[in-house]
């Protein structure tokens, strides 16, 4: 498959996600989510919006033969990478708003940095709750808002300046649910109460400003729409908007913070 899938992603973009985004950003979050969910080696765990399987792989290393790990994602491109990297996990294609599982089938349901990409997040939360067993745990993470992640705010502004509003909005999209109270409100709208919401500090590390810009643009939704000259222009604009990077020719590291919601079903 070379044409874009249900998420608008190609296999090349999915491989780029695994090659670049995972070591730069996502590698640190599975252990945080595992701890938040209190996962035991006997748990049956569902990873909703599993992507290339970063979280599912970590859980598979921890669960015993009496537990299980299932991943579901809308993107067949992402799932192709996930299956190649971890054949022991049951990866399935499907929608977070219509999970193809029976009621109360899992001890733990986790969704890492996915909820902001779907138009009806409350419906997805209700579905995750539906497949959760009594005594089970539901844990969801999203990025904090751009105001709390200023480097990405500067990247969005630089992209807007060089590539226009639509391109900038595609980079701002992942931060849409990170405003204070928004994640908890989605749980309440879904009819789920007693949710604990906490902020978590993370970081991002890239070999250079140019690698940061290239990864965000060419390993994601803008992969086929930006040329080398535009990439260079975005990098220069980012340096001008974020003075800490102005003189940096080497690695850059900066905060990238998230919000985690945890619910325990009685």
Image: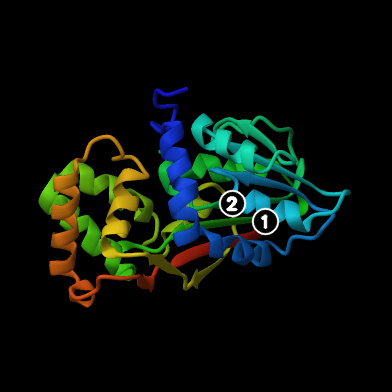
Instruction: Identify the residue shown where x is 18% and y is 63%.
Output: 238
**Residue at label 2?**
54
Query: Relative to the observer, which residue lies in front, 217 or 183?
Result: 217
- Residue lying at 38% horizontally and 31% vertically, measured from the top left: 8
**Residue 243 horizontal side relative to residue 183, left or right:** left
| Residue 79: image tag | none
Residue 189 position in % (x across, y down): 49, 49
Give the residue at the far right of this rendering: 66
Q: In which quarter of the image is residue 49?
A: top right
The secondary element bearing badge 1 is classed as helix
| Residue positioned 22% across, 44% down in the render | 167
Can residue 259 be seen in the rendering of this structure?
Answer: yes
Secondary-structure class at tag 2: helix
Q: Residue at x 15, y 51 (%)?
A: 160
Horizontally, is 68 left or right of 17 in the view? Answer: right
Please tell me how crowded label 2 is: few (under 14), some (14-19), or many (20+) other residues with Cα within 10 Å.
many
Question: For mark 1, what is the residue?
Answer: 58
Residue 109 lies left or right of residue 105; in this view the side is left
Q: How far across and down, in percent of the image, does residue 103 sit?
A: 73, 36
Instruction: Compare residues 190 and 8 and report the one nearer the observer.
Output: 8
Please name the colour scheme applied to the rendered image.
rainbow
State the CA–CA distance, disc 2 to disc 1: 7 Å
């Amino acid at each position: 498959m070379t044409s874009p899938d249900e998420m608008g992603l190609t296999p090349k973009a999915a491989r780029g996600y695994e090659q670049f985004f995972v070591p730069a950003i996502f590698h640190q979050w599975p252990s945080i989510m595992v701890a938040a969910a209190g996962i035991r080696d006997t748990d049956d765990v569902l990873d909703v919006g599993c992507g290339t399987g970063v979280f599912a792989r970590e859980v598979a290393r921890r669960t015993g033969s009496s537990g299980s790990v299932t991943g579901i994602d809308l993107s067949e491109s992402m799932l192709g990478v996930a299956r190649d990297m971890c054949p022991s996990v049951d990866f399935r294609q499907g929608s977070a708003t219509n999970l193809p599982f029976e009621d109360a089938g899992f001890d733990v349901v986790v969704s890492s940095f996915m909820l902001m990409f779907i138009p009806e997040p409350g419906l997805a939360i209700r579905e995750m709750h539906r497949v959760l067993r009594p005594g089970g745990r539901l844990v969801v993470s999203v990025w904090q808002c751009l105001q709390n992640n200023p480097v990405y705010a500067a990247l969005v502004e630089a992209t807007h300046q060089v590539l226009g509003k639509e391109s900038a909005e595609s980079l701002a999209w992942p931060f849409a649910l990170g405003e204070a109270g928004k994640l908890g409100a989605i749980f309440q709208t879904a009819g789920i109460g007693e949710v604990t919401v906490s902020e978590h500090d993370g970081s991002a590390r890239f070999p250079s400003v140019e690698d940061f810009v290239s990864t965000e643009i060419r390993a994601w939704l803008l992969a086929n729409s930006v040329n080398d000259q535009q990439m260079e222009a975005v990098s220069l604009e980012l340096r001008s908007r974020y003075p800490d990077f102005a003189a940096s020719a080497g690695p850059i590291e900066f905060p990238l913070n998230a919000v985690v919601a945890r619910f325990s079903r009685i």
